[in-house]
Image: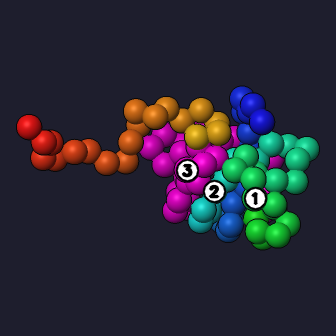
Amino acid sequence: MAVRSSAVAAADQWVDPEDGVRYPAGEVHGWVQGHNGTVCGLSLSRSGLTRFPHVGWADVQPESGRHAEGVQAVCRRCAAGLGARRDERGWTRTNPRP
């Protein structure tokens, strides 16, 4: 499934005390509106994920997102399906072989 933009489905939620809007928390997944599954293939109903149609995928990224305060983990398979680049690795080699 080729996906260009998506909303968010998450395992938990938090409510902003200033404006009363709910935002995703816990583990977040990419979700395409109109489908009952995430980009990585999880069923929303069986996984117990909550939909957040008003929150975009870019807004929950911990490094640059606006609504990422409660996000603990981002699904790596959803990130790959939504265009994460391969050179953005979570590790670095400290002692390369000669």
Q: Position of residue 23 (x, y in %)?
A: 68, 57
Question: For numbered disc 3, what is the local secondary structure?
Answer: helix
Snapshot quadrant of residue 63: top left
Q: Image quadrant for the C terminus? A: top left
Kindly report the distance in space between the C-alpha atoms of the residues bearing marks 1 and 2.
12 Å
Q: Position of residue 10 (x, y in %)?
A: 69, 60
Q: Which numbered circle lies on residue 28?
A: 2
Tell me which label, 1 or 2, sits earlier in the chain: 2
- Is 92 situated above or below 9? above
Residue under the image location 76 percent in, 64 percent down: 49
Snapshot quadrant of residue 1: top right
Q: Amino acid at mark 3?
A: Arg
Question: For numbered disc 2, what is the local secondary structure?
Answer: strand
- In this picture, which residue range is highlighted in magenta? 50-79
Kindly report the distance in space between the C-alpha atoms of the residues bearing marks 3 and 2.
10 Å
Q: Amino acid at mark 1?
A: Leu
Q: Which numbered circle lies on residue 31?
A: none
Q: Amino acid at mark 2?
A: Val
Among all residues in the image, which is located at the extreme left?
A: 98
Tell me which label, 3 or 2, sits earlier in the chain: 2
Tell me which label, 1 or 3, sits earlier in the chain: 1
Q: Is residue 92 left or right of residue 22?
A: left
Residue 60 within the segment the image draws in magenta = yes
Residue 42 within the segment the image draws in magenta = no
Residue behind mark 3: 76
Q: Position of residue 44 (x, y in %)?
A: 81, 61
User: How would you rate the neighbour count of disc 1 (Cα within 10 Å): few for under 14, some for 14-19, many for 20 or more?
Assistant: some
User: How would you rate the neighbour count of disc 2 (Cα within 10 Å): few for under 14, some for 14-19, many for 20 or more?
Assistant: many
Q: Nearer the viewer, residue 95 or 24?
A: 95
Q: Nearer the viewer, residue 19 or 87?
A: 87
Residue behind mark 1: 42
Residue under the image location 12 percent in, 46 percent down: 95
